[in-house]
């Protein structure tokens, strides 16, 4: 299987580490990290990714703006996006899905749930 | 995996604000706690004062006594106390969970959880293990950060370590 790559966009080091550990267990998937939406856009411009997993609430550029920017750029428009939300994020969730996110994961985060969602979207 | 990451993150800093933030993130992201507070014991008075809160105004979290319920039992046992009931209304005076933050056998503070995220239906065995982890390590992490901040630490030298080992009867 060709190597696939995931971009995790999360400002919390604790959450980022959990997501990295979880996705590192998926065979054939390499994982890169970004601190916020702007950092993610920089990484997208320099490397190809097969899936993006992003938090919503982040400084500098939040997850909703990132989804919008990614979907409006034809270079990235086909990349599946998974958003991570809290309970108060029902509106954010609807908005992100309306903007073009493909799936969402709610907190508390469990590794098997993250792995399952990513594998489904990558069809692996 | 949540336990490993939580443990790893707890010992990743000597900065008090970072240490508190890591505890908050573990409770929110790994446990799914929606409203909670971190309280620290003021030893002279025996009172626990809130130093951080999530989902609830810090000023609304009451000062509590370590020798009175709801904290007394968890202070005596040194183990997390988890309420079986899940009331419809949350109340800062009646936490659902009390986690003693320990340094060895000594309790330095507590985490009190008042409610969970809406989608959190029940506690899992991992949640209980996370409570124990926070209890067993949380106090040590906060105390280490407090001591580090107040120590006026300069550049680390090998001699510092040798002096400490000698003074503690190690293999200096």
Image: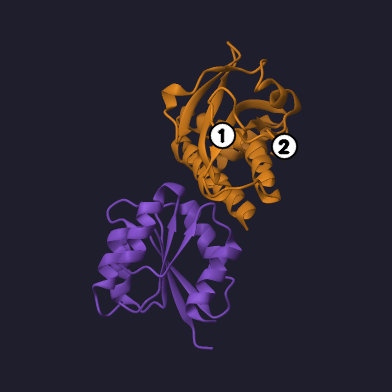
Chain colours: A purple, B orange
Quick one: quadrant of the C terminus of chain B? top right
Where, by quadrant of the figure, is residue B140 drawn?
top right
Question: In this view of the protein, can residue A38 be seen by the observer?
Answer: no
Crowding around mark 2 (Cα neighbors within 10 Å: few <14, some 14 to 19, many 20+) is few
Give me the disc on residue B88. 1
Which of A17/A68 is in front?
A68
Percent position of residue B129, x then y: 69, 46
Percent position of residue B21, x then y: 47, 41
Per the model, the C-alpha gap separating discs 1 and 2 is 55 Å
Give me the disc on residue B120. none
Which of B88/B124 is in front?
B88
Residue in view at x 32 percent, y 65 percent: A98
Q: Report whether A32 appears left or right of B33.
A: left
Q: Residue furthest right?
A: B77
Percent position of residue B116, x then y: 55, 41
Q: Mark 1 lies on which chain?
A: B
Q: Which residue lies furthest to the bottom in this view?
A: A1
Q: Report whether A6 appears left or right of B165.
A: left
Quick one: quadrant of the N terminus of chain B? bottom right
Q: Mark 2 lies on which chain?
A: B
Q: In this view, does B104 lie above or below A27?
A: above
Percent position of residue A52, x then y: 40, 69
Where, by quadrant of the figure, is residue A28 drawn?
bottom right
Q: Report whether B106 appears left or right of A4.
A: right
Mark 1 vs mark 2: which is more N-terminal?
1
State which mark lies toward you, 1 or 2.
1
Which of B131/B145 is in front?
B131
Give me the disc on residue B170. 2
């Amino acid at each position: 299987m060709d190597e696939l790559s995931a971009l995790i966009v999360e400002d919390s080091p604790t959450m980022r580490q959990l997501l990295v550990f979880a996705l590192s267990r998926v065979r054939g998937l390499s994982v890169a990290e970004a601190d916020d939406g702007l950092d993610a856009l920089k990484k997208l411009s320099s490397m190809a990714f097969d899936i993006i997993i992003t938090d919503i609430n982040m400084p500098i550029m939040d997850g909703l703006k990132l989804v919008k920017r990614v979907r409006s750029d034809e270079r990235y428009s086909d990349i599946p996006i998974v958003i991570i939300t809290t309970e108060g994020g029902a509106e954010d969730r609807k908005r992100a899905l309306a903007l073009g996110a493909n799936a969402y994961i709610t907190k508390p985060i469990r590794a098997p749930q993250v792995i399952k969602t990513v594998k489904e979207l990558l069809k692996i | 995996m949540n336990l490993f990451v939580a443990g790893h993150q707890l010992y990743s800093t000597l900065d008090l604000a970072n240490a508190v933030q890591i505890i908050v993130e573990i409770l929110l992201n790994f446990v799914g706690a929606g409203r909670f507070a971190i309280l620290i014991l003021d030893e002279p008075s025996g009172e626990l004062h809130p130093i951080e809160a999530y989902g609830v105004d810090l000023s609304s979290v009451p000062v509590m006594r370590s020798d009175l319920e709801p904290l007394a039992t968890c202070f005596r046992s040194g183990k997390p106390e988890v309420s079986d009931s899940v009331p419809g209304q949350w109340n800062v005076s009646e936490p659902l969970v009390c986690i003693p933050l320990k340094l060895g056998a000594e309790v330095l503070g507590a985490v009190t959880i008042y409610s969970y995220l809406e989608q959190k239906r029940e506690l899992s065995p991992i949640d209980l293990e996370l409570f124990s982890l926070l209890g067993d390590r949380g106090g040590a992490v906060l105390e280490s950060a407090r001591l580090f901040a107040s120590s006026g630490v300069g550049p680390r030298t090998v001699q510092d370590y040798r002096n400490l080992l000698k003074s503690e009867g190690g293999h200096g």
